[in-house]
Image (cartoon, helix red, strand yellow):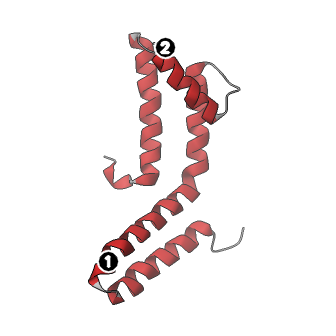
Amino acid sequence: MSRPDARELLEIARQTLLHELLPELPAQKRYLTLMVANAMAIAAREYQAGDRVSLEEGERLRALLDDRQASPEAARRALAAAIREGRYDAQDERERLLEALRRTTLARLQISNPKLLP
């Protein structure tokens, strides 16, 4: 693997933006620059963990649906249909559903906004 990798390049560029360029920019460009820096941080975390998070979500959804063949996209659509049909209305099924959704949400939040995690 070559160094620096994509995540490292994003972090180098982000640090340069924040520490070298931001102080030189006019005040009215500060918010936009911070938004770009935040997007770069999200992209770096997505690069590092995104595939794993997606694979784990797919596994959770397939297990919830008892369908080991569904793609993640197909599993999401099937889950939405199953919820609409009331498949998860029973207490034990609802708890399984909520746990799977909670774990997926926390994993996605770790990428998009880890500051919100406890």
Q: How many marks?
A: 2
Viewport quadrant of the N terminus: bottom right
Image point (62%, 35%), residue name: 72
Tell whether 62 sits left or right of 42: right
Q: Where does residue 64 sit, x and y in percent of width and height?
A: 55, 22
Image point (33%, 55%), residue name: 115
Foreground: 41 or 30?
30
Q: Where does residue 70 sit, x and y in percent of width and height?
A: 67, 28
Q: Name the residue under label 1.
A: 30
Q: Single out the residue that lies furthest toward the left.
A: 27
Q: Regarding mark 1 in the picture, which secondary structure is present there?
A: helix
* Label ID, residue 85: 2
Image point (41%, 65%), residue name: 38
Q: In this view, does 69 lie above or below 4?
A: above
Q: In this view, does 32 lie above or below 97?
A: below
Tell whether 4 sits left or right of 26: right
Image point (57%, 57%), residue name: 48
